[in-house]
Amino acid sequence: MDIKEIIKPENLVYQKTKLMTDAPLSYCPGCGHGTAHRITMEVVEEMGIWEDTIGVAPVGCSVLAYDFMNIDMTQAAHGRAPAVATGIKRTWPEKFVFTYQGDGDLAAIGGNETLHACNRGENIVIIFVNNGIYGMTGGQMAPTTLPGMKSSTSPYGRDIATMGHPLKMTELIAQLPGTYFVTRQAVHTPAAVRKAKKAIRIAFETQREKKGLAFVEIVSNCNSGWKMNPVDANNWMVDNMFPYFPLGDIKVNGELIK
Amino acid sequence: MSEVKLMKGNEAVAEAAILAGVDAYFGYPITPQSEVIEYLMVERPEDRTGMVVLQAESEIAAINMVYGAAGTGKRVMTSSSSPGVSLKQEGISYIAGSELPCVIVNVVRGGPGLGTIQPSQADYFQSTKGGGHGDYRLLVLAPASVQEMADFVDLAFDLAFKYRNPVMILSDGVIGQMMEKITLPAQKPRLSNEEIIERYGDWATTGKPSTRERNIITSLELDPYRQETHNHKLQAKYKKMEENEVRFEAINCEDADYVIVAYGSSARISQKTMQLARAKGHKVGLFRLISLFPFPKNELNKLADTVKGFLAVEMSAGQMIEDVRLAVNGKKPAEHYGRFGGVVHSPEEVLIALEQKIIGG
C-alpha cells in the first residue's frame, strides 16, 4: 500500500490543534511545557472560544508562550500575570482570560498577585506548571524545590533550616473562598495528559459560568535543570515530586475535597 | 453642559476621569492622593458610565492591571504618590516598551525613602528621564491648579493614544490637596467594545478573529539588533513629541530682565513673587512649564537672548535646573532655588533668592 493511500481524512487519528503555531518549541526535549501548551489550546479550540480568549504569558521558560499559542496574548512582567489578567478580565468580562505561569513566577515573585487574584475570585484560569526549579535562568532553587534537592543555588541540596520549605501554593490558594476549582495534574503519561486536559476544560467552563478562579497545577519535569535524561526525570518526578505534590482535585465546585 | 464646582485637586482628577470616558482605574491608597480612589468609590462610576474601579493589593499590581487593560485598547489610569510610583516603575517600563497608552498621576510627596507626606517636586528626574529601566520617556504634564488637574486628564489620554505612550500627570501634594473652584467638562461617552476593536484592532489584544493575525503585547526581544531597531522607533517617537507637544505659559516674559522658571505649585508661588518683584521695580517674568517632557528647550534658549538671568524654582534640591541650564547653554546665568523635603517655599523666600542669586548677582 502506498503511503498516499493511508493519508486520508478517515484514517486521521491525531491532528495538531490549529491554535498551536508552527514555530518550533523552545523547550528542551522531554519537557512537559509543550504538552501543557497543546492541551490548553486544544481545550480552547474544542470549546470554540479562541476568538474570545486572551492569554497572559509569564517570565520563565514559557515567556515565549505567545510564539506558540495562536491567540491574542500579553507578556507579563515576572510574577505579575494574575494582575495583568485581572486588568484584562475586568475591562472585558465577556472574554476568556488565562495565565500560564511557572513556579518561580507564580509562587515566588508573584506570590502576592496570585494570592490576591485568587482571593478576589477573579473569573480567570491560572495554569501553573511546577517543575521545582527555575528552568530558564539555569536551574536555580525555586520556592517549590524539594528538601535536599540540588540546584545551582542550593548546590548541596535545599537546606530547610536556612532555605525554607517547598511552598504548596495550590493547597494554599484552595483555602481562599474566591477559588472555585483547584486541581493538581501531570502530563507525563497518556492517561495523565487526558486527565489534565479534562481539568483544564473544567477550569475554562468555570470561567464561562463566572463561578470564580480556576487553578490547574501541572507537576512537570525539568530534565535540563535536574541534570537527568527525560526518562529519568519523569521517574524522579513520580518518586519524589508526587509524594510532596500529590496529584488530584483539591477543590471542586467551590468545596474542598482534600 | 459644563458645571462649576469647588473641589480638591485629587477629587478633580477622579471626576475628570469619569467625565473623560475612562474605562478603568486601578489604584492603591497612599497619602497625599488617596482621595482619588476614595472619590471614585463613592461616585460609583460603574453606574454612571460603566467605568471599572478596583483597589489593587499593591501599586505593583495596580500598574500591571493597567498594563493588561491598556493592552486591550481601553482607556486606563492609575494614581499614586512618590514611594508608590517608585514601585510602579517596572510596570511603566513595560508599558513604555510595549507602546501602550495609559495615564499615571503622581501627587508628589517628599523623599527619599518613605520621606514625608508633605508636598515636594523631587520626582522630576524620575518622571522626565525615564524612571524605570531602559531607554524610554514618558510624556509629562504638570498641572498648576485644580482646574488643570481636571483638564489634563482628557488631554493626557488624547496624547497617550496619539503616541501609544504612557503619559504622566506630575502633580504635588499642594495641588492634590488644595480646593479651588473649577469648571468641569461635559460627559464624554466611553468607547464601545466594537469601536475599540475598529480603532485599535491592529494592535490590541481583544481576541483574535480569523480575519487578522494574532496581536501580542510584549516588550521582549531576544535579538539585540531587533531590540535596537525597536529602540530607534521609540526614540523617533520621543523626537516627534519634542517637535509637537511642548507646552508652556510665558507670563510677562516679553519685557523681562529676569525670568523665573517653574512648574506646578512652585509656578503658582512664583507668580506672586513676580508681582512682588514688579512692585519693587524689577522686570521679572514667569516661564511656567506645562510639559516637563518634552522640555521647552528652544523657547528657553531663545529667551536667553533677551533676559539677564534665570531662577529655576522647584521644591527639590535642584533637578529641573539641569534642564534649564542645558537649554540656556551658558548664554546667561541660571540658578536654582527651592525648599525641599516637604517644605514649601513662600513667595517672599523666592523673592530674596531672586534678588540675591540673579538680580544682585
Image (tube, coloured by chain):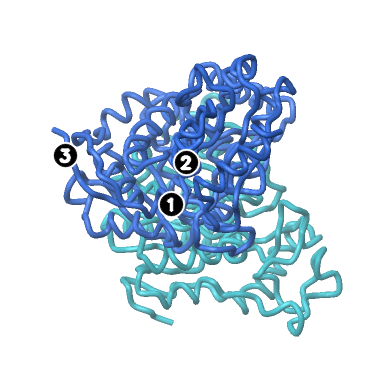
Chain colours: A cyan, B blue
The answer to which quarter of the image holds residue A243 is bottom right
Query: Marks 1 and 3, how far apart in space?
Result: 23 Å
Q: Residues within 10 Å of mark 3 (few under 14, many from 20)?
A: few
* B182 up-or-down from A184: above or below: above
Q: Do labels 1 and 3 share a chain?
A: yes
Query: Marks 1 and 2, how far apart in space?
Result: 9 Å
* A196 up-or-down from B273: above or below: below
Q: Residue A112 in the image: x percent, y percent?
A: 52, 66
Q: Residue at x 73, y 57 (%)?
A: A230
Give the mark toward the camera: 2 or 3: 2
The total of numbered circles placed on residues is: 3
For the residues bearing labels 1 and 2, Cβ distance under 8 angstroms: yes
Q: Can residue A16 be seen in this view?
A: no
Residue under numbered circle 3:
B3
- Residue B174's tag is 1
Give the mark toward the camera: 1 or 3: 1
Q: Residue A65 in the image: x percent, y percent?
A: 57, 43
The answer for which chain carries disc 3 is B
